[in-house]
Image: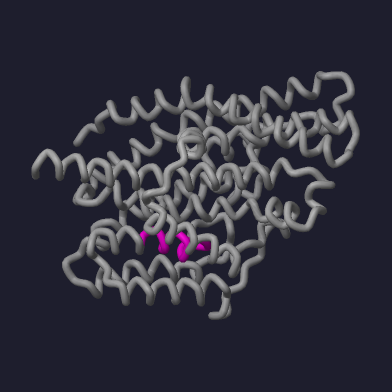
């Protein structure tokens, strides 16, 4: 490859990474707006509709993972040792930040309970609660999450386990095997409708996986279109799949979540040349922002209630809450997340 071609390939790769960071940033901000919106703001027709659907950013994250993870593993997992290496590196990249965020949240909770005028519930966390939260099994154990967003991390962890097993089949020399494996991700929604299991989100992750397969010429356009249609039928419950969700706000496994997922998928392809330094930077800290925006931003919003509930107070509180959350997320990224990434790259797993 010539120097010019190398530079071109590098630029293409960088632009593709940029759009992924942009989408991550938008998804994280959407979830922030959902959690930090005020009662009066949510009543405004346009803002209320936009903010109340901010939880759909979670599905954008699922599509991005479905695309990025198999793409990063392409040509790598051919043995159990490499599969274990992959899981180990994901653990080192993501888990330390999560643990610190949980400890940080508990510390803030205890600290807030000692402040005069505290109106919430005093913390009461049992050793078992800590166990299921630190092992990301609180959902399946029917126990409360210390961090409300932790359930999505549990889904991602389950995804990492299954995708490592699927990668060799996605690269199989026979198209039927490749496509059958992709369809298995869509139809796993019928295995369990429980939202605490990755199976419920199989069709969504599958959209990202299908895009990865298409980018590596493992899937033709017609086959890609066929998967999108099948995922649509399953995701909108036209095949008889019903889901019982824990709250009305998260009863989102429907047409809306599917449309957001497809838009995310298309944006990765169509908007690959889009540039936004601000959103790219938000994308860099999106994981930390996702973890800390409720314990940090939520406290800013709660404190603002003492000033009244006028719409302008709620608007100012929400902006301040997001700003504080991003500042703390930046610290988390610099001192915890980035070192975790370097640690994951440096550690090698024994082949024994």
Give the residue at the far bottom of this rendering: 239
Q: Height in image: 314 above or below 339?
A: below
The span shown in magenta is 199-209
Q: Nearer the viewer, residue 351 or 302?
A: 302
Q: Give me the residue at 21% from left, 45% from top.
A: 9
The C terminus: image quadrant:
top left
Q: Is residue 132 magenta?
A: no
Give the residue at the far left of this rendering: 1
Horizontal placement of 122 versus 99: left or right? right
The N terminus: image quadrant:
top left
Q: Position of residue 146 (x, y in %)?
A: 65, 37
Q: Position of residue 135 (x, y in %)?
A: 52, 39
Horizontal placement of 344 versus 193: left or right? left
Q: Nearer the viewer, residue 349 or 26?
A: 26
Q: Quadrant of residue 53?
A: bottom right
Horizontal placement of 53 versus 185: left or right? right
Q: Give me the residue at 37% from left, 54% from top.
A: 67
Q: Position of residue 345 (x, y in %)?
A: 29, 30
Q: Quadrant of residue 208?
A: bottom left
Q: Position of residue 338 (x, y in %)?
A: 41, 26
């Amino acid at each position: 490859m010539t120097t010019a071609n190398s530079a071109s390939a590098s630029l293409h790769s960088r632009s593709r990474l940029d759009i992924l960071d942009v989408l991550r940033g938008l998804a994280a901000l959407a979830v922030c707006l959902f959690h930090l919106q005020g009662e009066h703001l949510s009543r405004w027709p346009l803002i209320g509709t936009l903010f109340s659907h901010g939880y759909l950013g979670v599905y954008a994250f699922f599509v991005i993972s479905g695309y990025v993870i198999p793409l990063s593993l392409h040509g790598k997992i051919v043995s159990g040792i490499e599969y274990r290496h992959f899981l180990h590196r994901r653990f080192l990249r993501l888990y330390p930040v999560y643990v610190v965020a949980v400890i940080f949240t508990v510390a803030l909770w205890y600290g807030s309970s000692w402040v005069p005028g505290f109106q919430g519930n005093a913390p009461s966390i049992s050793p078992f609660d800590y166990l299921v939260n630190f092992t990301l099994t609180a959902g399946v154990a029917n126990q409360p999450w210390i961090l409300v967003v932790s359930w999505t991390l549990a889904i991602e962890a389950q995804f990492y386990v299954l995708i490592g097993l699927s990668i060799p089949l996605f690269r199989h020399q026979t198209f039927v095997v490749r496509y059958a494996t992709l369809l298995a991700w869509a139809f796993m929604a019928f295995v369990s409708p429980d939202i605490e299991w990755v199976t419920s989100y199989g069709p969504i992750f599958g959209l990202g996986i299908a895009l990865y397969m298409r980018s590596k010429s493992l899937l033709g356009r017609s086959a890609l279109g066929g998967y999108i249609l099948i995922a649509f039928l399953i995701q909108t419950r036209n095949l008889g799949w019903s889901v019982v969700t824990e709250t009305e706000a998260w009863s989102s496994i429907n047409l809306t979540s599917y449309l957001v997922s497809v838009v995310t998928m298309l944006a990765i392809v169509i908007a690959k040349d889009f540039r936004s330094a601000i959103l790219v930077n938000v994308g860099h800290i999106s994981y930390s922002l996702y973890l800390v925006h409720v314990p940090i931003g939520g406290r800013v919003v709660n404190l603002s209630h003492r000033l009244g509930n006028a719409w302008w107070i709620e608007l100012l509180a929400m902006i301040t809450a997001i700003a504080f959350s991003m500042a703390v997320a930046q610290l988390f990224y610099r001192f915890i997340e980035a070192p975790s990434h370097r640690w994951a790259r440096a550690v090698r797993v024994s082949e024994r």
